[in-house]
Image (cartoon, rainbow, N blue to C red):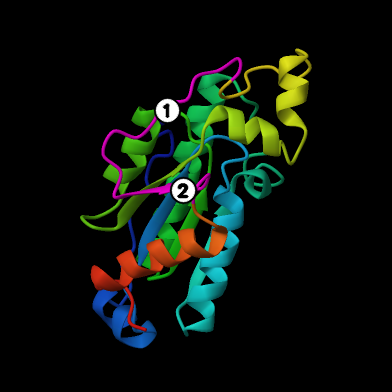
Amino acid sequence: MAEQKATNIKWHHGKITKEDREKLLNQKGLTIWLTGLSGSGKSTIAVELEHALIENKHQAYILDGDNIRHGLNKNLGFSPEDRTENIRRIGEVAKLFTEANIITIAAFVSPYREDRGNVRKLLGHGEFIEIYVKCSLEVCEERDTKGLYKKARAGEVKDFTGISAPYEEPLNPELTVDSSKLSVEESTRVILNYLEEKGYVKF
């Protein structure tokens, strides 16, 4: 965890409770954490999931790996240390969104179990749903929507997960969605069904 450097600071509490926000938005705040190899379909599923939730009058917002690196984390690379800091920062942002009772959809490779576990610890019980977007390396390479696997194989991209850097599969995710077998729509439906069954949303 990052060292606390600021001193003489105090946490300020507001008058609005989490229960107040739940009643207002008719939903429970949580973070849906999509993890998987590049090309597995995380971002595509995230976009479809956000759209489906908004269409059904639920507040949702995507935190996407590439997008975050354009701003908040633009000073981070892909070394193991930078990857850990990348996920730590996102975890803190996701916590704030979740406390505001937004359904936060985080789509990150997030290759290390410990980093994902640390985000889970940041959030309250039941507020972190880890979804493994499972897809074989072979299928991800066939898709190669960004051309990154080709560059990684050629040595043009360093520390690339699945090729020159490890990916640690989730051991006990809340859900596993096999994107090599399910369409984007089917994958989204599996997630929506889970959210409804667990009482996070009502359709």
Q: Quadrant of residue 66?
A: top right
| Left or right, 129 with reference to 33 | left
Residue 121 screen position, x and y as percent: 27, 43
Q: Nearer the viewer, residue 76 or 146?
A: 146
Residues in magenta, as a range: 163-181
Residue 198 screen position, x and y as percent: 23, 68
The amino acid at mark 2 is Leu
Q: Quadrant of residue 28?
A: bottom left
Q: Secondary structure at mark 1?
A: loop
Compared with 152, 25 (above or below) is: below
Q: Nearer the viewer, residue 130 or 175?
A: 175
Could you tell me which residue is drawn at 73 percent across and 41 percent down? 145
Circles 2 and 1: CB distance less than 8 Å?
Answer: no
Q: Nearer the viewer, residue 99 or 114?
A: 114
Give the number of the disc on residue 199: none
Label 1 Cα neighbours within 10 Å, binned few <14 / some 14-19 / many ≥20 = some
- State which mark lies toward you, 2 or 1: 2
Could you tell me which residue is drawn at 54 percent across and 34 percent down? 37
Q: Secondary structure at mark 2?
A: strand
Give the number of the disc on residue 34: 2
The amino acid at mark 1 is Tyr
Label 2 Cα neighbours within 10 Å, binned few <14 / some 14-19 / many ≥20 = many
Mark count: 2
Residue 87 screen position, x and y as percent: 48, 38
State the CA–CA distance, disc 2 to disc 1. Answer: 13 Å
Q: Quick one: label 2 or label 1, which is nearer the N terminus? A: 2
Give the number of the disc on residue 112: 1
Compared with 36, 22 (above or below) is: below
